[in-house]
Amino acid sequence: MHQRNSALRRHLGWAPLCALLTATLAACTDPAYTQNTLNPRGDFARMVDHVFLTTVWWAALAFVLVEGALLYAVFRFKGRPDDPEPKQIHGNTTVEIIWTIIPALILAMIAVPTVRAIFKTYEVPVGPDVTEIEVIGHQWWWEFRYPKAGVVTAGEMHVPMGQPVALRMTTQDVLHSFWVPQFAGKRDVFPNRNNVLWFRAEVTGNFSGQCAEFCGIEHGRMGYRLVSESPADFDKYIKGLQATAPPGSATMRMVSSAAPATPVQVSTSGATVPQQKARGDTAAASVQAAPAAPAAPSDPLVAQGEKLFTMKGCIGCHSLDATKPTGIGPNLANVGSRTYIAAGMLPNTDENLARWISNAQAVKPGVLMPNLMLKPDEAKALVAYLRTHK
Amino acid sequence: MATTVTGDLRTQAAHAHAEPTGLWSWITTVDHKRIGILYGASAFMFFLIGGLEALLLRIQLGRPDNTFLSPDAYNQLFTMHGTTMIFLAVMPLSAMFFNFFIPLLIGARDVAFPRLNAFSYWVFILGGLFLNASFLFHAAPNAGWFGYANLTSTQYSPGLNIDFWMIGLQILGIASLAAAVNFFVTVLNLRAPGMKLMRMPMFVWMSFITQALLLLAFPVITVALILLMFDRFFGTHFYVPSAGGDPILWQHLFWIFGHPEVYILILPAFGIVSEVLPVFSRKPLFGYAAMVFSGAFIAFLGFGVWSHHMFSTGMGPIADTVFSLSTMLIAIPTGVKIFNWIGTIWGGSIQLKTPMYFALGFIAMFIMGGLSGVMHASPPADLQQTDTYFIVAHFHYVLFGGSIFALTSGAYYWWPKMFGRMLDEKIGKIHFWLMLIGFNLTFFPMHFAGLLGMPRRVYTYSAETGLTWLNQLETVGALVLFLAIAAFLYNILKAWAGPRNAPADPWNGATLEWAIPSPPQPFNFAEIPVVHSRDPLWELKRERGGPLPEPARVSGAGIHMPNPSFWPALTACGVAAMLIGVMLLPKLGPWGIIAGGALLLFGVFNWAFEPA
């Protein structure tokens, strides 16, 4: 923060307007705005913010001069109908050359830092300390895979503070755009292709982000949470995910199958709904995943919930094993401990979770999760069961 | 005997050029002025529809987590708002001015191809009605005006929504292309003697450049839409990734059309303002040649910047740099235009009439749209701004603060010439202030909403984001804009009810249209004028040492004007039916297309062999 303040101070000589702008910008760094791009918390976003502020100062200067000239001319040269005809001037070559060159110079002042920053945006960090995350867009939720650790999760992306994070991003269906407002910018995701984004988180905390490319009916609610935590907490988090694998199964299996970027192959007609194919994959995965649940639930409510998870068909789309990639629904291995559910929409309270699993269509019309027709006590049991998955 | 003969001749002549009346006369008209009015009335109707759509969107966003509109309704409305405002409001409002005023400003009696002109209008209105008919089927387009693949594939959009959009745009594209050919030829071939290219009024110049843009840009969207049509109806995979197609192909094709399209929307506005400012400053346009060349340069560069809409797609540092620099380059000719407008009023005797209010408002607002444009010409900054409300703010400053303010200026300026009635000055100024305040209240906070984290095209947001107060301000602004448009409508109705007594030259105009009666007679000029300078009417008035006498309405005997024709409208129906037949393939098989094609051929045949 102090870096920007000193930069601002240098410009303060200009005019009261700069002070006003500064005050506005200071107000804009208010943490009350949860997706505030003017309040960077990562090095990428800070670099972008710096370029943006350069353009803002030059634009402010141009704004004051040009709008000022316009207003001055209107008041200075206001005439009456009976005034004599003003001097007829057709142009002035010198003046016209000057006001062609000045904007060109201002643009050069913006272009130089711009081009420098462009190249930096593509310099993805590499090395042993880099946390690689594969980001996969789905209608309408985000999946996150940690290939080195062999785990997958959804809706909440954990990153170690202070360490470089490299995102490799793709989509399972239509185009989306992964936006990390306070840490980086955004990049669109395409099928069959990896796009990159990187950043280093400067603080710990829980932040929000969301899809920025229109992607269908629930685009407006395709959010996620970004949790930045100390490297030690991050390790613990990853170990926790690895521990959701059933005892004896190969935790690292996912890594070998890792081109997770490969989207579901659809038959050539292009008309096949991918979910059908995906459903098959997932169902297979889920059958193996079933034992991942705590072996012998002592609480009868949890035991009932476990049964319902299979009976109501949840298991068809959702895996409870973080070491296996899922096809259609978000992986639920640690759903009990996530801060938000329903793609960043609802805080993860028992009440919200019950509301969501009982009638997802009422919460998010058009979402791919069907209405499960749960009775209130069934919802309660399922919530209790899901809570045990942390 | 002799008196009887002359009498007969007189009635014959009067009959030949009497103002025709009745619905049939409008359907068969080939008069550029009446076609202009048809364009204007239709476009204004669509403008009101598009505005109501926007108002519904703003009501939905007036509260966090609002359920006033369902997500699907919201997506349909924002798609139709964009599509309507671009293709059915701003473009045809410009077309109204092209139609009515290009022939008048260049001293011609009509456009080069009057029947083709009628055909363009009928294709346009059928396309517009077809697009809006989608609401009746609860299937309005819902993938955005930009319709990015692969969301538009049958897999992800199986309904009729995208079909309506795709076919509707194809129909409208035919109208635009036919009109562009017509005006391009008109400007090149029908100028009055002495009107060299560098003596043309700036509105004609900017319109001429716009026609060139239309001719080069519309084929690209046509191709892109044909590929989409093949994907959706015939199982090809141009944009289907699972079969080796690539959705990014759509983005490149769409924006190679889409960016020039922005200049198609703004260049006519530049032209209008360049007519209004000199007249109400009583001083010629400053730097005429620079204005012509900067307009041409903007249009040329407009074809080399399309990928600045795609910085977040990750094209790589070289492509980002090239498109960033070419985009920044456009700011230079645009700046030259703004400076020349200020140079025009500088040292003038500024007459603050309503058209001038809107022209000055245009400059003030367009400057802001231009400056925010430079901000996202920088790809790193754009990685935050793209697809947020910052962009929504930017292009509304260009297209509303720019195009709509200028078009409104043109409406107040030319209303007396078009209808022979003056719009009220007092209501006009109320209209201006309401529009300026409402516009800024709606769109200025959007800059901040975007930077503070509000993405575009979202049907709602949560209160946690802290964005509620900004959205509420915007919604209040939209209501003020609603009042502004109500004031304009009231002004129009009041003028309609009032006397038809506008003088030929109410503003001390500089161009040829002010030399003839208001409204003009069907043949425009009893005698084709000879032009000696850029401001022919000022020159004439200076020579006379005062205003010109009110021109008399003459019989126009002996002036040959084209006959009304029904065939353009019928041919237009054939074109529309053929394309709609594509959509009906699953229902009717090829018969819809064949019937439309037959109608088209029948129309064209009769058109070709119609006696002139």
Image (cartoon, coloured by chain):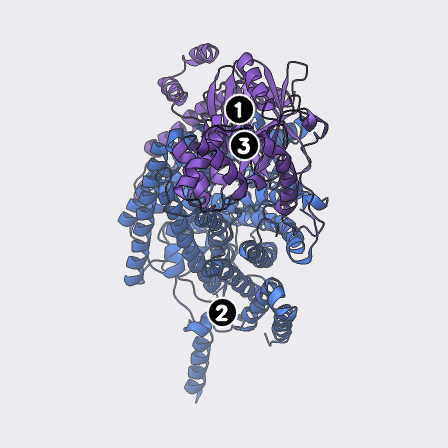
Chain colours: A purple, B blue
Query: Residue A106, position in %: x, y?
Result: 53, 23
Which residue corresponds to the image point at 62% horizontal and 72% vertical from the top-left?
B595
Residue type indicated by callout 2 = Thr
Residue type indicated by callout 3 = Leu
Query: Residue A316, position in %: x, y?
Result: 58, 41
Q: Nearer the viewer, mark 2 or mark 3?
A: 3
Query: Residue B19, position in %: x, y?
Result: 42, 71
The answer to which of marks 3 and 1 sits earlier in the sequence is: 1
Which residue corresponds to the image point at 42% horizontal and 62% vertical from the top-left?
B520
Numbered badge on residue B29 = 2
Label 2 packing within 10 angstroms: few (<14), some (14-19), many (20+): many
Question: Foreground: B373 or B111?
Answer: B373
Relative height, residue B582 to residue B204 (above, below): below
* Residue at image mark 1: A102
Numbered badge on residue A332 = 3
Question: Foreground: B44 or A146?
Answer: A146
Judge from the rendering whether residue B53 lies leftward or rightward of residue A270; answer left or right.
left
Q: Nearer the viewer, mark 3 or mark 1?
A: 3
Label 3 packing within 10 angstroms: few (<14), some (14-19), many (20+): many
Q: Secondary structure at mark 2?
A: loop
Residue type indicated by callout 1 = Ile
- Subunit ID for the residue under disc 2: B
Question: Foreground: A332 or A299?
Answer: A299
Judge from the rendering whether residue A141 lies leftward or rightward of residue A276; answer left or right.
left
Is label 3 in contact with label 1 (beta carbons under 8 Å)?
A: no
Corner quadrant of residue A263: top right
